[in-house]
Amino acid sequence: MYLDNVASTITGFLPVIDTLERGMAQEQNEDFKKSLEMIIKQYNECLDRFGVKAFGARGDQFDPNFHNAVMHTEDESLGENVISQVFQKGFKLGEKIIRFAMVQVAN
């Protein structure tokens, strides 16, 4: 019950980190970018204290138990069923998936 409550609370905050990371991907002046980096670092440290780990990165092997494939692409530089792009990172609390990674899969 406790882990379910923690997972539910953390899930409510995940869109905030998504927005911050999208902001980092945009061209910004260096001071603004440093500010976003500090906020993201603090946010990730907070998630770490709760035992929440992010997963789903470009180059990882696609696993339907962890990833939600929303697109497919042909990319000869990547192997079969390899994640070619991550649209949204996944998160887990211990062994409990609290959000599946939304990804594009190659080949």
Image (cartoon, grey):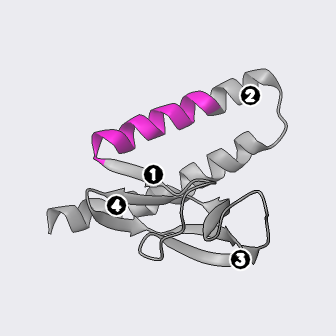
Q: Which residue is mark 3?
A: 71
Foreground mark, 3 or 4, reads: 3
Q: Main secondary structure of the magenta part?
A: helix
Foreground mark, 1 or 2, reads: 1
Q: Which residue is mark 2?
A: 32
Indicate the secondary structure of the residue bearing disc 4: helix
How would you rate the neighbour count of disc 3 (Cα within 10 Å): few for under 14, some for 14-19, many for 20 or more?
few
Looking at the rendered structure, the kind of residue marked 4 is Thr
Residue 45, position in %: x, y? 40, 35
Q: Which residue is mark 1?
A: 54
Q: Earlier in the sequence, mark 3 or mark 2?
A: 2
Residue 62, position in %: x, y? 54, 68
How would you rate the neighbour count of disc 1 (Cα within 10 Å): few for under 14, some for 14-19, many for 20 or more?
some
Residue 9, position in %: x, y? 34, 61
Looking at the rendered structure, the kind of residue marked 2 is Phe
Residue in view at x 46 percent, y 56 percent = 13
Q: Earlier in the sequence, mark 4 or mark 1?
A: 4
